[in-house]
Amino acid sequence: MSSTGQKTAMAHLGSHLSDEQMVALLDGEAEKNSAAQARAHLETCWQCRSRMHDIEASVRTFVEARELVRPEAEQLPPAPVEQFRQRLMHHAAQQEPGTQTSFVETVAMLLRPARIFVASHRRAALAAVAAVAILLATFTDLINTTASAESILLRAQTFESRRAPGSGQVARTSVHVQSFNRVTHAARDLGSIAWVQDSATAASEVDAKSPALANQTQILRDDAEAGGWIARWMQQASDLAPNTGIYLASRHWRPEVSVREFRKLIEARGATGTSVEHGDGLYTVHYPFAANHISGIAEALLSVRSNDFEPVRVSLITGSGEAQTEYRFESVGFAVSARTPELAKVFDSASTANDATARTPHDLPGPTFRPVPVAYLATTPTEVEVAAIAALHKVDACLGEEVNVFPMSDGSVMVQGLVDRTERRDAIRRALSNVHGDFTVHVITPGEVHSAADLLTPPDQIPARSPAGGHASTMTLADLSSEQMPIYVQLMAHFSANGRSHDDAQEQVAAFSNELVNSARQSLLHAWAMKRLDHEFPAERTASLSPEQSRTIEQIRSDHRRWIAILSRRQREMLAQIGVEAVAGKPLPDDASSDLILQTAEAENSLIRSLFTVSSDGGDTSGALSRLLSLLEQLGG
């Protein structure tokens, strides 16, 4: 431009461009001549170019801040959006014919005063932007806390599905692994793991590096091998507890930061609570595990980006107190690439290896895990487990004996028992001989116990202990040596009434008392068996049973309830024989809980023993008999 043109433009515009002129130029709203003159001025004026740059930076900062803090579209309530649209439509309807404005132009016109204000009062506007951003962030946090953990997982799954590899491709992921002491905040770098997951088979290639280990590269043919491999690598690279490693292996978990792998971790956590945390551009979902979970895991966390829901981090919290440790798996890379002929050959070879030559998880580097019992809630009941429970029920091995059915960490089932006689051991083994599958039996007598290692710790402990064990047919004899049985006089009077000798009447009293005491004990054992069955098959597990398996478990439960009723009615008949008058009582409902049945059976057993065995209790026997009959009516309905 000539010097004369520059002077003319300067004279027209004044010494410098105003903020309004700069904003109009940026928005494309300046008239053609004015825009040309403004651009010409900017070419020669460093001061105006600098101010133009500041305005552009301010607007860009505002837009970026708005994008970070505004909620997702589906989180906005529909009513304000609809109201805004109606106002725009009303405004458009007021335009003169032939001058209707487009939706974008209308929005731009409505927002123009705000842009002019930003241009005219930059410092004040920037301060206002900061304040609005803080308010939006605050209120957005309030909105986001209402988002459920499950909804966030579903959004993250949608993100993952969009980038999943297609046919002829493989997914390459890498994670960085660290551990943190949650009390001392001491951090430890455990290394990095890179996975190449095939899309055509279940095989994968893993490449792991760790400061504590030599580099390892392995081809794993399926999730089971992958889960075993990572559990052993973690134990070698860190101080991961054995139970935690076993749990990870049993869940077939890969250290990928993905919803698919995260769900494997939490499916058997034995708890239902969740929570959501929002901060630093992330949503973090918290999934606590049941107290004293067999895995040693206290909580699992998944963090996803709040703007697009990409999973970025998985954390496992283990231990408690000063030993509480967080194992963090941070995503550091993801890519989809071609399934090259070389990769295809390796993966296809791994996936088609036959059982005779295929590697098992125990062939992989690292220590071999000895299978251990897994918490009931951490497993899905199998056909083998249900069949074993049914077989033990048929020989009454569920009535007080130390015989347990263990779901094991390798997916198998073990029946372990300690019984008092070889005949009893053999009877239980014969009953279990018809159970087939991945199943072992270890029922022994005290003389066959060589060390404490022969007996496994039960996977779950029922809060209160079962009555003293022993086979169901074992009799408990009433001790009449001191003739201090509270109801002794009444019994002797009844059995001496027909002219029996004192010795004969004494024998009748002993036989009568022994039958009542053992009948009450049998009722209690059946009640305990019901409680134990509910502990082994809670609602969370029974939901996954097949119809046939559900009928088997329900039939066992019904058998115990039926025997409790039979035994209670027999006790009422016996008491009626000695002149104890019936007392009205309301039977327990058919759907009474095992806790209520057990509580009633314990009270009945306690009263029977206090009345019909030697006791120092010299209280009101008639009142105790009335309470006893009421309990028997409840149990025998």
Image (cartoon, rainbow, N blue to C red):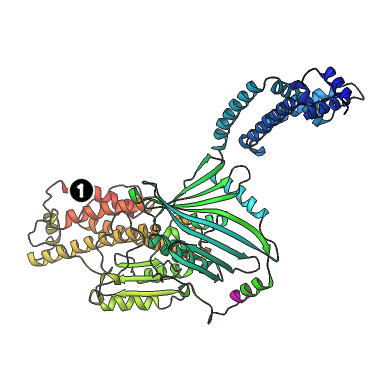
Q: Is residue 608 left or right of residue 301?
A: left
Q: Is residue 545 left or right of residue 454?
A: right
**Residue segment shown in magenta:** 348-358
Q: Specify few, some or many for label 1: CA neighbours under 10 Å numbering under 14, 14-19, or 20 or more.
A: some
In the displayed orientation, state which residue is furthest to the right: 98
Residue ID for mark 1: 624
In the displayed orientation, state which residue is furthest to the bottom: 356
Q: Nearer the viewer, residue 296 or 268?
A: 296
Residue 550 is at least partly visible in this image: no
Q: Is residue 249 magenta?
A: no
Q: Residue 155 location in percent, x, y? A: 62, 47
Q: Nearer the viewer, residue 577 or 212?
A: 212
In the displayed orientation, state which residue is furthest to the front: 3
Q: Above or below — where is 549 with respect to 278?
A: below
Overall secondary structure of the magenta section: loop
Q: Is residue 352 magenta?
A: yes
Residue 534 is at least partly visible in this image: yes
Q: Above or below — where is 118 with respect to 448?
A: above
Q: Amino acid at mark 1?
A: Ala
Q: Residue at point 53% right, 81% down?
A: 357
